[in-house]
Amino acid sequence: MKVYSCLILNKAGGLIYQNNVNPGLNSLSSNDFLVLAGTLHGVHAIASKIKPIPSQAKDDIGVTNTHNTNTNLIATGKSQNANSNQSGLQTIETDFFNLYIFQTLTGLKFVIVTSPNPVVHNLQPMNDFKSISRGELQKQYDSTVKLFRQLYLLFSDFVMKDPFYSLDMPVKSSLFDMRVKELLV
């Protein structure tokens, strides 16, 4: 898997970091990246609202239980689910690139644009199509999840711990740029 580009969006959908790690796709202008960031933010927000309606459970006396994760969070002070990327847009797969989105608990969105999965798009020879397991198709997604975790650690270490960085402002750290390039190349 080749990573073409890495983007970080703030919780309002503004582009705060953009790095073209490997050339390979048509180049976009800085204005195009801003439009892309806003569009992804809007689509992610809409997609997180489109989900099945959970069935409401009734307790022993017939009262409808509307206990949800937000009330659990308020009552316990802890998130019941460590994975904040359960709803919303997670992946866009095309014949030319794949785009993966990971949203953190604080609302930051990390976006990685990669080469397409060769197994899914028949770019690699296969002897028997039925021999492809779900694990084979999930391999690229799982490797991007690992990249997101490492990227988030780099962001925490080199950006959030910088005393001169203001929240939701563009990232201007050459050390962070260097570490991101090392990770994604």
Image (cartoon, helix red, strand yellow):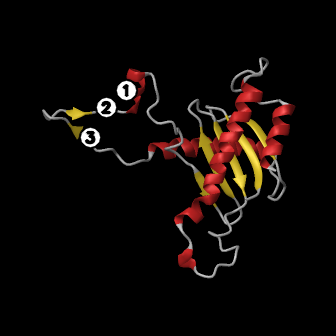
Q: Nearer the viewer, residue 89 or 116?
A: 116
In the rendered structure, the answer to whether residue 111 lies left or right of residue 22 reads: left
Q: Give the crowd class for mark 3: few <14, some 14-19, many >=20 residues within 10 Å.
A: few
The residue shown at (42%, 47%) is 51
Q: Indicate the quadrant containing the N terminus: top left, top right, bottom left or bottom right.
A: bottom right
Q: Nearer the viewer, residue 160 or 39?
A: 160
Q: Give the crowd class for mark 2: few <14, some 14-19, many >=20 residues within 10 Å.
A: few
What amino acid type is highlighted by mark number 3? Gln
Q: Is residue 104 above or below residue 52?
A: above
In the rendered structure, the answer to whether residue 54 lies left or right of residue 37 reads: left
Q: Is residue 50 above or below residue 154?
A: below
Q: Which mark is residue 71?
A: 1
Residue 98 found in image quarter: bottom right
The residue shown at (76%, 49%) is 5
The residue shown at (54%, 68%) is 133
What amino acid type is highlighted by mark number 1? Thr
Cα distance in 3D space between marks 2 and 1: 6 Å
User: x and y percent of residue 70 in the render?
Assistant: 41, 29
Q: Which mark is residue 56?
A: 3
- Answer yes or no: is residue 172 visible: yes
First in sequence, mark 2 or 3: give its number.
3
Which residue is disc 2 drawn over?
67
User: x and y percent of residue 9 in the render?
Assistant: 67, 37
Q: Secondary structure at mark 1?
A: helix
Q: Are marks 2 and 1 in contact (CB under 8 Å)?
A: yes
